[in-house]
Amino acid sequence: MGITPQRPKHRPFVESPQLPLPRRIRLFLEFSISAITQHNQTLVHYSIIVISVVPRMQADDREDENEDGYYTHHSTNPSGRNQHKDCPPKGDHKVANLLREYHRQNISDRKLISKLLQAEHGIKMSEATVARRRRELGLFGSHLTAAQLPEVTKRQLVLDQLADDPTGRRGPRVVKELIANKTGVMLPRKYIRDQMMLQEPEGFVVRQPTSKKLSRRPLVVLGPHHEWSGDGHDKLTQIGFPIWGIRDVWSGKWLGIWVLPNNRLKDAIAYLYLSLCYQLGGIPIQTTTDCGSETTEIYGFANALREHFSPHLSLNELPAHKFLKSVHNTTIERGWLRLRLQWGDNVKVFWEAGSGIYDEMDLRQYDLVKWLWPKLIQQELNQLQEQFNNHHVRKDSSKKLPSGVSPNVAFALHDEYQAENCLQAVDREVVRQLMESIGGEDLIHFVSVEYENHAQTIFTNLGFKELSFHNVWNIFSAMLPLI
């Protein structure tokens, strides 16, 4: 037989005799219900607790007495910002854009985002706040996103990336990063792999590593900008578009990838090197390239700039430039392999699609191609550089340099690896004058500035919103009669 719950009697509250009630006390009512179940017996206890007798507050406690004799409380924190005074408020547009950008970079870990906000932008935000702001913006991880999206939408996202990779060189990890980068949607790598196995199983066979590997020795550098590795890429030279690039050795981050008319011209290569120095406002402690004649001018500028702006670093003990054989210039050479497999071979496929449209003996067509295709390739290289720098590499415990994170993350959080930023500051104006003295921007242009402006005007007037490998020959055909 159960026990009938009874409401207990409450002790009546007695007004203090010293002062009238409103001026002497505050009432705090707490209503608590507790239920205890044991052997089918339930006891429900209701209680009202009256907490009173609060001493009169001092003048600096921010309570004022009104004309009726009551105390009114003034909030000591009207903005509602507790503890985290440096954390931007809810609805801050800058933070929202940064969180979307990290999401697009395939970064969803709230601890890592909190560190990056502090390191890159000086924004202090706790991990819990990061998670809450991401939810408010509708930014979710891959598994929750996959559960919410229709199957046809998820499959189409994968198919779109497969269409951009006719040679089948991109694996599930790269496809996952590209989907996040271009659409802002995160999908599980397992789902992407299953779809790729279903749609293009032969791609997994093509991507099996079969090349002979050279023995490597660990690279030892002090941190970002300690050493830059530069080299040219000639796989697209046969269709008229050579490439040159520079990569940071410590982090593996690509600092610049450019398409130019001739990557064997020493003035053009020196201009790209100086343009990067101008952009960053500094030079590395050391630059490494192969022994090609086109790099001799870089050698001269690297030594001159370091001797002038960093005289405390002895050129005899630590050379400003070092020549290596191509097979030993590993940082940049490995980067070129990925570029060719994931992108360069596809470029040739899309180029050959215009074999029945383009006649290189026609000067009008030749000039238009020399404006249109470098524009497209540089656009693609910029996107590829961002993709590579956001690529999360595998953890390698035998590697002395950072692994298990993307180059961008390693670069931003280099302090966590006990590394130092080795960039040597220079006077930008001096670098700019050097750039102009060797020929300026014309060194890397395929057509004249006048032709470039004219072609861009036609492109804009035709209403084209974007340029891609899928529509480049259609745009060529539309622009040719107007050139």
Image: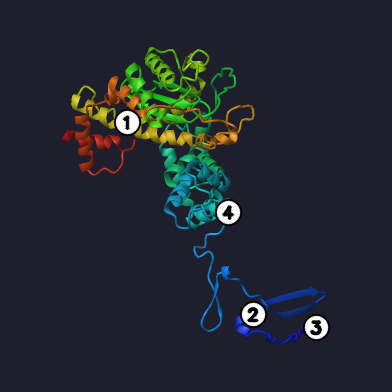
Location of the C terminus by quadrant is top left
Q: Quadrant of residue 212?
A: top right
> Which residue is identified by label 4?
128
Mark 3 and mark 1: Cα distance apart in space:
87 Å
Give the total of numbered labels: 4
Query: Disc 4 versus disc 2: distance between alpha carbons?
Result: 38 Å
Compute the Cα span from label 1 to label 4. 51 Å
Mark identifier at residue 3 = 3
Q: Which amino acid does label 1 sit on?
A: Ala
Q: What element carries label 2?
A: loop
**Where is residue 2 shown, x and y percent of the image?**
80, 82
In three-dimensional space, the C-alpha distance between marks 4 and 3, rounded to whole angstroms, equals 45 Å
Label 3 vs label 2, nearer the camera: 2
Q: Where is residue 358 in the image (x, y as percent from the top left)?
A: 25, 28
Residue type (three-letter) at the residue carrying disc 2: Ile
Dot 4: element: helix
Type of amino acid at the residue the image marks with label 4: Ala
For the residue carrying disc 3, how many other residues have a C-alpha within 10 Å: few (<14), some (14-19), or many (20+)? few
Tell me the quarter of the image containing the N terminus.
bottom right
Q: Which of 124 and 32 is in front in this view?
A: 124
Q: Of the two numbered discs 3 and 2 on the same chain, state the one appearing first in sequence.
A: 3
For label 2, the residue is 25
Q: Name the residue under label 1.
A: 353
Task: Tell me what residue is drawn at x 41 percent, y 28 percent.
Answer: 344
